Image (cartoon, rainbow, N blue to C red):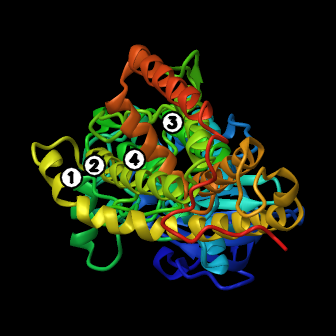
């Protein structure tokens, strides 16, 4: 037999422990992995451990207990441990060879991160696998993208070369750092005992990598990566706020402050089933706003029912839900029809101006909530929100333009058809558009223009802004009820005057009757 140190780089055809080496598969901090075949022609993965590990009686004892636990484990998302030899300096571990590509390889090939549904599925599958591993009394301790194989049947957790039972003495921090910096929990970097919390932190780090397509704590100098890991500062830019906030929480440096795995899974599944509408990005610092943090309502819209949990920040700050006020909005539509029937242009201008105002308010408030989710509450939040109002006003105007153009074009087309084919029949005047029927049609056209702008492209910011504004102007059930009554009274007064005078098109020229 060749000396142990000469057998670290095994050539194809080399025999070891009844297995024949076919080809190398990779290497890590604890050894090199080879594709091998046994005497029966079965293919497997053999991890030849570094000589110092096999020569260490403490490490050998750990591996014996670990292997015994893993051989009893049967789970579709965990690679089976088939054999092991730990009683010599030429120690190795044999597992089933999983067909597929690693998560790391897949993301590099695709050159794009996982979508929300795939991310939630990955989180569920790996969480189930880790739960089974922990119930077997084992901590994996090296969960990273290269140790997650993506197969036709779903993800599979591989490579327990760094695994250990819960009551063992930890290996040195140096050997761990040499393994996979950026995917090692802060407590492992500091040489603390490995518990199940270590794997759940690694699970969150793998999910962050899958969601962004890049290492969660950056690349480059080892010290920089470890410093960001210890500080709990992952790179989660460009993720939806709900996903970013929960992963940030799960990657906290203090294991006692981390989000529970079930909460992370629930947040990712909610994101997949109710994706945020990322129509706008209103924070000048680059913090994305989640305008979809809202709940359905009952009664008059003043009380929410559970539908979508509001965003939760890393410090426990909760984004207040933007509650729809359907009663107030419908009553407002009645006012728009009544006013638009008599002063269509001025009514449209006033309502669009109000949209700009509430949109600005919404962008400003949502930006403040997003900053609080990311950084916590600060005494400077309100002053900063006041200072950024002009910036959000500009964004509000620019963001409203697409919906305005589309709605105006649609209203112009429908209005022209009415003018050509129906105006003469409904008007009570031979020279100008007048009469109750004409007024009602014009009012409905104005309402259509407003509704189109309300639900058009990039319009969610307008709707959320209106909800935020109404929460201040007409708070609670009493405020909502008072606003509805006021709108209905105003609409009744306006309707009583429809048709008493020709439609006033100022400040533009009134259209004449079609010839």
Q: Distance between the residues labelled 1 and 2?
A: 6 Å
> Do the CB atoms of the residues marked 2 and 4 lie less than 8 Å apart?
no
Q: Position of residue 349 (x, y in %)?
A: 48, 59
Location of mark 2 (residue):
368
Q: Distance between the residues labelled 2 and 3?
A: 16 Å
> Do the CB atoms of the residues marked 3 and 1 lie less than 8 Å apart?
no
Which of the 4 image quarters holds residue 413? bottom right
Element at label 1: helix
Element at label 4: helix
Location of mark 1 (residue):
385
Residue at 56%, 20% (x, y): give it: 305
Q: Of the residues under marks 4 and 3, which one precedes in the sequence?
A: 4
Q: Which mark is residue 294?
A: 3
Residue at 45%, 65% (x, y): give it: 238
Q: How far apart are marks 1 and 4 (CA)?
A: 21 Å
> Do the CB atoms of the residues marked 1 and 4 lie less than 8 Å apart?
no
Residue at 37%, 46% (x, y): give it: 58
Q: Which mark is residue 76?
A: none
Q: Can residue 227 be seen in this view?
A: yes
Q: Distance between the residues labelled 2 and 4?
A: 15 Å
> Do the CB atoms of the residues marked 1 and 2 lie less than 8 Å apart?
yes
Q: Distance between the residues labelled 4 and 3?
A: 16 Å
């Amino acid at each position: 037999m060749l000396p142990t140190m000469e057998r670290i780089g095994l050539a194809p055809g080399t025999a070891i422990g009844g297995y024949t080496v076919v080809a190398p598969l990779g290497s890590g901090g604890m050894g090199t992995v080879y594709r091998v075949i046994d005497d029966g022609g079965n293919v497997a993965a053999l991890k030849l451990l570094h000589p110092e590990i096999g020569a260490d009686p403490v490490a050998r004892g750990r591996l014996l207990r670990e292997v015994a636990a893993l051989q009893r484990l049967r789970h579709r998302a965990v690679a089976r441990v088939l054999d092991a030899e730990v009683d010599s300096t030429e120690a190795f571990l044999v597992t089933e060879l999983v067909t597929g590509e690693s998560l790391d390889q897949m993301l590099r090939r695709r050159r794009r991160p996982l979508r929300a549904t795939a991310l939630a599925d990955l989180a569920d599958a790996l969480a189930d696998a880790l739960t089974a591993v922990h119930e077997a009394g084992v901590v994996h301790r090296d969960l990273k993208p290269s140790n997650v194989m993506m197969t036709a049947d779903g993800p599979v957790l591989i490579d327990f070369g760094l695994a250990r039972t819960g009551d063992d003495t930890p290996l040195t921090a140096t050997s761990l750092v040499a393994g996979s910096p950026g995917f090692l929990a802060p407590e492992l970097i500091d040489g603390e005992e490995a518990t199940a919390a270590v794997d759940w932190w690694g699970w969150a780090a793998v999910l962050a990598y899958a969601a962004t397509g890049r290492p969660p704590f950056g690349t480059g100098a080892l010290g920089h990566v470890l410093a960001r890991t210890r500080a709990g500062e992952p790179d989660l830019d460009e993720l939806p706020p709900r996903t970013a906030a929960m992963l940030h929480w799960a990657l906290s440096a203090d294991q006692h402050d981390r989000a529970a795995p079930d909460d992370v899974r629930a947040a990712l599944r909610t994101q997949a089933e109710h994706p945020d509408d990322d129509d706008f990005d209103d924070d000048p610092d680059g913090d994305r706003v989640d305008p979809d943090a809202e709940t359905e309502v009952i009664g008059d819209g003043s009380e929410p029912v559970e539908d979508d949990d509001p965003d939760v920040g890393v410090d426990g700050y909760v984004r207040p839900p933007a509650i729809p006020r359907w009663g107030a909005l419908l009553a407002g539509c009645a006012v728009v029809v009544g006013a638009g029937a008599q002063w269509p242009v001025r009514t449209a201008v006033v309502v669009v101006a109000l949209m700009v105002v509430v949109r600005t308010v919404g962008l400003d408030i949502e930006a403040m909530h997003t900053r609080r989710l990311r950084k916590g509450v600060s005494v400077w939040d309100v002053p900063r929100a006041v200072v950024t109002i002009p910036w959000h006003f500009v964004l509000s105007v620019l963001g409203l333009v697409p919906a305005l153009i589309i709605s105006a074009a649609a209203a112009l087309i429908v209005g022209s058809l009415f003018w050509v084919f129906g105006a003469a029949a409904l008007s009570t005047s031979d020279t100008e558009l007048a009469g109750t029927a004409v007024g009602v049609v014009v009012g409905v056209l104005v309402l259509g223009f407003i509704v189109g702008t309300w639900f058009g492209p990039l319009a969610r910011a307008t709707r959320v802004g209106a909800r935020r504004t109404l929460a201040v102007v007409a708070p609670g059930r009493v405020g909502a009820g008072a606003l509805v009554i006021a709108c209905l009274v105003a609409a009744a007064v306006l309707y009583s005057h429809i048709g008493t005078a020709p439609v006033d098109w100022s400040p533009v020229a009134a259209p004449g009757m079609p010839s």
